[in-house]
Image: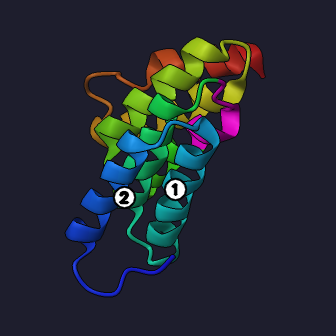
Amino acid sequence: MKFLGNEALASSYIENAVTMDTLESDKVALITNVANSYLAAKNYNQAGNWFRRLLTVKKNTTKTDIYKAGYNYYKAGNYKTADTVFVMYQQKYPDDIIGFYLGAISLAYIDSTGALGLAKPDYEKGMRLG
């Protein structure tokens, strides 16, 4: 799916379609198509928004679903939102190092001097798991 013109308008139409659709599989397909289109266009923040939207629609989210949302925010430089998503990953998969590692990296960008020590707890949890 490629956007030809007003992306905001196209996104609003797709959001309406997602809201009106009754089948989870159709909603997931629409959202995934939009997210992948933004990803292909290297609009990582919008890709993150749509992958995150997927988390509200899909009943059984996977590690990959959460990762795609968080990692696209990270690639966009939206580190605070990336960390928020990686905290979701950590809560759902507390024995998986990836959520703590990526959360730590996001927090390290937020606290670039390390003065606040924001990334330290996630790095420590990740090291215990590794």
- The reply to whether the C-beta atoms of the residues labelled 2 and 1 are less than 8 Å apart is yes
> Which quadrant would the C terminus be assigned to in this image?
top right
Mark 2: give few (<14), some (14-19) or many (20+) Cα within 10 Å: some
| Vertical arrangement, residue 82 with respect to residue 129, above or below | below
Dot 1 falls on a residue whose secondary structure is: helix
Label 1 neighbour load within 10 Å: few <14, some 14-19, many 20+? some
Question: Which residue in the protein does label 2 denote?
Answer: 14
Disc 1 marks which residue? 30
Horizontal relation, residue 9 to residue 34: left or right: left
- Give the residues drawn in magenta, as a range: 60-67
Whether residue 100 is situated above or below residue 111 in the rendered picture: above
- Find residue 112 and name its label: none
Question: Number of labelled discs?
Answer: 2
Quarter location, residue 38: bottom left
| Residue type, numbered disc 1 | Leu
Using the image, determine if residue 81 lies above or below residue 97. Answer: below
Query: Looking at this rendering, what residue extends furthest in the right direction?
Result: 130
Query: Which tag, 2 or 1, sits closer to the chain's start?
Result: 2
- 5 on left or right of 124: left
Residue 67 falls left or right of residue 95:
left
47 w.r.t. 112: above or below: below
Residue 89, how many percent across, how many down? Answer: 57, 24
Residue placed at 54% from the left, 63% from the top? 33
- Residue 119 in percent (x, y) is at 43, 26
Q: Which of these two is toward me, 7 or 62? A: 7
What amino acid type should be assigned to the residue bearing mark 2?
A: Ile
Colour scheme of the rendered structure: rainbow
Q: CA distance from mark 2 to mark 1?
A: 7 Å
The percent position of residue 79, horizontal first and vertical second, equals 34, 43
- Residue 126 appearing in the image: yes
Which x, y percent locates residue 108? 39, 37
